[in-house]
Image (spheres, helix red, strand yellow):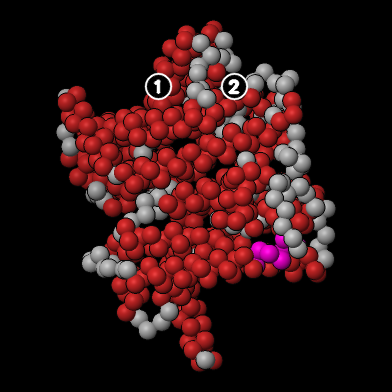
Amino acid sequence: MVSTIKHYVSVASCWARLAIQRQLEYPLFLFSWLLMIPIQYFSGIWMLKIIVDRFQALNGWDFPQLTFLYGLGLISHGIFVVFFINTWSIDHMVINGGFDRLLLRPMNVFFQLVASYVNFIGLIDCIPGIIIFVYGAEIAGFEWSLVNIGKLILVLIGGILIRAALFTSLGTIAFWTKRNGSMVGFALTMLERATMYPLSMYPYFLQALFTFLIPIGFISFYPAAEFLHADSGGIDLPLSFALWTPVVGIICFLIAGGIFKFGMKNYESAGS
Amino acid sequence: MLQAYWYITKMKLLTNLTYRFEVFTSVATNLILMLASVFLWQTAYKGGAGSAEALSLQDITTYTILSITISTIFVCDVQNTVYYKIREGQIVTDFYRPIPLLACYLAEDIGEMFSSLLNRALPLVVFASIFFGIPWPSSFQNFLIFLPSCLLSYAILWLLSALVGLIAFWVMELGNMGNVKDSIVRVLSGSIVPLWFFPESVQTISKFLPFQYTYQTPLGIYIGNTSITEALTSMAVQAAWIAILYLILAAGWARTKKKTLIQGG
């Protein structure tokens, strides 16, 4: 058992080193991302500020709270893209036969899929995320106590697992259809709108959908509402929401793992 | 001569119409964006807030729906095309063609524009009409001015895109600067939040940049926030920007061609 874990860790770290070296090969390439990502997200929060200043707080969410929520959603997105970005390219691997290689090796297939590409560039998403979050925490009066920090870490882990589960399930579609089009773009848009903006803006039907069926409300909206004692909309769940996120995350992740295994049974190589 | 361009346009149109699944997800993605933005505005206007604004909730809803719809039609792939062709070295074979290269890429983009009109813009407008009512223009006259203004907008966007494409000739590994340009355009064109809501100082600076003439101008005309005389003035500004950008592009392109020849492809 211990030697297996050691083996997996050594393989993962070797892959990580290769992936980082590969990405640092073209330092100028990083530059365009380094410009684009901060522009995109800082302008996003700026838009929210313009709207809130001009009109009113969004369903009770004032600008400091919105900033906190936006930052929390963005950090969990950033960490997700560092570790799980390969779940976006399952269809690509099925088409070009890259997936066959994973099946031939004596290791867990999902582990190989995820660990074989650590997206170093994803850290760039974390930069505006952390800046916006820390600023939001400051102006929203978030208390940096040990308990809160512990809860925050659990929430981030849970949120990342929920995201990973969602993209793994979507990627699994490719085992049947060979391609899943731009499902990734679709899911990313949905996630951005549901995790970086208050869920309570949307009609009750959508709130219920994003709470019970596709539980992305747990990634950042419910935890942020809990941390800041803000209005969480029409749906009330018992117990502390901050504790629910990791539980929901683990459940989703296990279900997605099941779907992935089931999909693999139906996998036919597309040949290369 | 024109036949050659029409052939490129037609082929691009036909290719695009075959990718049905991509079309489905693209419509769904834009629909989500549209719904989320309209719900955001509805929340902002809730309880009578914003009744003092020049724009009513209905206006801003129409604005948002139209903005997302025309963004699917304004296809400016030229920046990516040039970038990838240079990276892969295919630009050499494109130079063999007996017609100007940039005009070729324009023909391709126009072909994609036609297909997007059918399979992206049309479904979006239909869905939007079901959810929020048909986004009528403020008057028939406004609609008639809206159309040429859109064409001018597209010309500005396309020229900007082509200019960004030229950067790739000089610095091949700079990554895709097109994305950087796109995120700037998205904010400063007023495609998400109209610039009328921005702080005064930003509005003043923006008047001297080409961006607000790409989305805000035609959309303002459509919802009737811009009077007819103002509309004609902004269309003149649009035309002026097209002239300026075209001259820069022509100058840049002439030098770029030499640059490529030196490298030998």
**Closer to us: B1 or A142:** A142
| Residue at x 76% of width, y 63% of height | A239
Which disc number belongs to residue A111?
A: none
Tag 2: amino acid: Asp
Label 2 SS: helix
| Residue at x 65% of width, y 21% of height | B56
Dot 1, how many residues are within 10 Å of its Cα: few (below 14), some (14-19), or many (20+)?
Answer: some
Q: Would you identify the image quadrant in which residue B189 lies?
A: top right
Residue A203 percent across, percent down from the top left = 62, 40
| Residue at x 55% of width, y 60% of height | A163
Q: Is residue A39 above or below residue B131?
A: below
Q: Is residue A241 magenta?
A: yes
Rounded to the nearest angstrom, the CA distance separating label 2 from label 1 is 22 Å
| Residue at x 70% of width, y 21% of height | B53
Label 1 SS: helix
Q: Is residue B71 magenta?
A: no
Q: Is residue B63 above or below residue B166?
A: above
Which disc number belongs to residue B59?
A: 2
Q: Are marks 2 and 1 in contact (CB under 8 Å)?
A: no
Host chain of mark 1: B
Residue A104 percent across, percent down from the top left = 32, 79
Q: Nearer the viewer, mark 2 or mark 1?
A: 2
Q: Main secondary structure of the magenta part?
A: helix
Which disc number belongs to residue B151?
A: 1
Locate residue B23 relative to residue A61 in the image: left or right: left
Residue B11 percent across, percent down from the top left = 21, 36
Host chain of mark 2: B
**Closer to us: B257 or A78:** A78
Q: Which residues are magenta?
A: A240-246
- Is disc 1 on the same chain as disc 2? yes
